[in-house]
Amino acid sequence: MIKYTLQRTFYMIIVFTIITLMCFVLIRMLPQPVLPPEDPHAQVMEMRREALGYNEPYLVQFGLFVKNVVTKFDWGLSEKLYFGQDVWKIFSGKLPATMVVNLYSIILSIPIGIALGIFAALKKNTWIDYLISTLTMVVISVPSFVYAFIIQYLFCYKLGWFPFLVKSGTDWLSWPMFVSMVPAIMSLSFGVIAGFTRTTRAELTEVLTSEFMLLARTKGLTKAQATIRHALKNCFVVIVPGIFGEFIGILGGSLIIERIFSVPGVGSLTLNAINGLDYNIFILSTCFYTAIGLAASLVVDVSYGFIDPRIRMGSRK
Amino acid sequence: MNDNINTAYEHIPAEKFAFVQENENLHDKELQTKARSFFADALLRFSKNKSSVIAAWILLFLILYSIFAPLISRYDVKDTDSMYVNYPAYNRTICDLNIGIMDGAKTFDSQNDTAMNFWRGIAEETGMNPVIRTVGTHETDVKQRGQIVKRYTYDIEVNAYYALGMVYRTFSYAEFQNIQNWQNETGIQVIYPYVEPSDINGIKDNPSVWYEVDSKGAAILDADGNFVPAYSTHADKAGAEYNSIRIPGDDGSYVYSTAKSGSVQCRVLYYNYYIYVNGHEPNYLLGTNVMGMDLFCAIGIGARFSLIFAILVSAINLTIGAIYGSIQGYYGGYIDLALDRISDILSGVPFVVVTTLFQLHLSRKVGIVPSFLFAFVLTGWIGMAALTRKQFYRFKGQEFVMAARTLGASDRRLMFKHIFPNAIGTIITSCALVIPGVINSETTMTYLGIVDLSDFAGTTIGTLLSQGNAAATTAPHAMLWPSVFLGLLMIAFNLFGNGLRDAFNPSTRGVED
């Protein structure tokens, strides 16, 4: 098992390096932004570029880039949006906003999602089940900006309960900040709730019809006991890796929701970098999102093996 | 004879027996029912699934809408009106029925007497009453000069198209003459008597005021409660000759324009001016958005692009994925491993990054739409390849394949003539679930502004949504209709796709993958 995990991690690092190399070269191939000639820092930037090998072959540039990142964690300087500032500092300054919003959202939505899923599975083929399943299907189908709009219009405008945009400032855990984040949290939660409801329902209905459930009932357990002790345990084999995946995903957040509610997070920074052609920020975001995506799938895969001893990951048979 | 009939069968006389057939052959009856093909069977199963059938009808309706709406509409996506911006739905015929829909209604809260007089002023001058109905009346007690006075304010619904009233427009002499000719022909009055700002307390930004006002801009009424006209009679300031329709009560002394250097400025009734310019009344079935675009037409145009694009992308991905997956699944071993690594690497790149890089690199060389298409194709086929690979692993060891191989069939023949047709049902049905995914990503990218397709496609649903989002509170309809369309489209596609999948693979019914 440990061998398998190490193997997967090693493999992930290789994939990550290849993707970074491809994106890095593609970005460096673009014409670099012209530095403002009057700015006294322009000359410094020019010399920095020289030192980073902007005029050398791409592989040399990539070598220098990796060397800087690995030894000094230096991702370069912003050349457009935040002229002359350290990219990693800007980026890490944006991380808390994204993480806080997403953390709230999954803390709220995972229990709700699982609860709804269990409820629907227990009431299978009744109107409650149909209602929950239909709503789940609708929420999963409809893009998030559509219900972000509905939430914004209903709760922020018509009812006036929450402000339109996330409040500025860095007091991430304060109450006013939470209130201003509620619309964004709700918009993010819908999708997660629906996802968990669907998985839980599908898993649980399958487990509930299996034979060991019948055995559990015959040996004298009540329905509740049998469901909690036997059915849920089995259905969590599928759900828990999903929860791990979500927790890694909180770093990434959602581009759209951050844009709509102007959360000062990583997503907005990435969008601004794309629109403003700030390549160093863009390279960092690319690496970041790639790493998150790969790490999430790695954790999900590996955790299956740890949770359920019946699953032998990477074994020959 | 025995009394008991039941036991009398032993003694049935021989002449009572007859042969069923004597000199003919006995045949099985031919099957009267027709043999049902695989597709007919699937269709039958599909039609039993009620929600999918409804979804199919909705889908058909939406597709027909996207084909015909831009044809029916009087507008094109390029027709953008500078004044009717974010205006509600309006159609004159339906508006006149007074049933509360498509009447261009906008709600104005807490209108005091000054504001009510302003609406009345527009109604009296133009003959088009903007106030549709009063929704609510508020009574407040105000202390004035030591006395308690009751003041009323009203919540009213206003026909935004009528409420726009007058605007200032500057014309060349020829244009001014053209409008007069048109007025004479049609009898619709566009140009109204000019009002010098100096006569109405210097108000320059409100061309709908034509009566005497006090310093606060409130109308001064005469003893009978009527407006006192303040039309310009300064003949010396007139811009050009006016020989057309005059308003009632005009003795010929009113001046209809004022001189600007080399041109004339007029007070123009925008509703009628619109008719003069466009040849018809405003007819916005779903209202207009922030660009002054007809939403009814724009949604159709946007959806048209989304649908065609999604179908194109799925077709390409299907082809690439099927070939790639076939090779992977058929050969297996090291080839499978190597190809799997390639798709692993490609699927690891975030889609936003792919789209951005393709836009930056290729959009100038091959155009925005092809580079957007490449971005979709680069990673989109991976799911399809995995699916095909799985199907190939399932079928390649079976006897019919071995039989074909023994007969000397080549690899290619085995792959595409013998194994692939078995997998085609699964692959095609999954296509119905790929299309909404593509539409979703496409809308997201255009919504975020990473890709701008307005030059090529006119507009897209994503662009409409991001434009609508800017005025989501003042003109919610501009966000609502594209949202409704997109929401319905996605739900219908997903339901339809699920139904197809269940119909073609009854064994996987209800399993989410």
Image: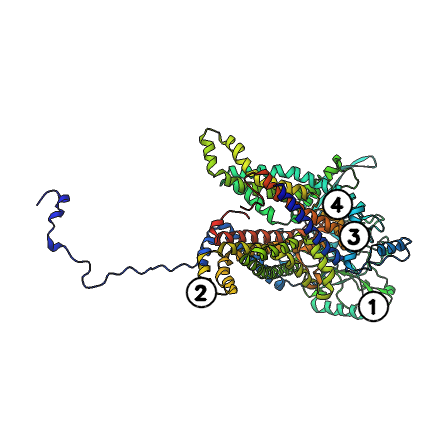
- x, y percent for residue A234: 54, 37
Residues at marks 1 and 4 touching, judged by CB atoms closer than 8 Å: no
Q: Marks 2 and 1, how far apart in space?
A: 96 Å
In the rendering, at what x and y percent does residue A196 appear? Answer: 59, 41
Q: Secondary structure at mark 4?
A: loop
- Viewer-side label of 3, 1: 3
Residue contact between numbered discs 3 and 1, judged by CB atoms under 8 Å: no
Residue under the image location 71 percent in, 42 percent down: A156
Q: Residue B369 appears at what percent x and percent y?
A: 68, 62
Give the number of the mark in front: 1 or 4: 4
Question: Which mark sits nearer the N-terminus, 2 or 1?
Answer: 1
Residue labelled with disc 4: A265
Is A258 displayed left or right of B26 in the figure?
A: right
Identify the mark at residue A65; answer none if there is no mark: 3
Q: CA distance from mark 3 to mark 4?
A: 25 Å
Q: Secondary structure at mark 3?
A: helix
Secondary structure found at label 2: loop
Left or right of residue B374: residue B29: left
**Distance from the alpha carbon under mark 2 to that under mark 4:** 64 Å
Residue B407, numbered circle: 2
Q: Quadrant of the N terminus of chain B?
A: top left
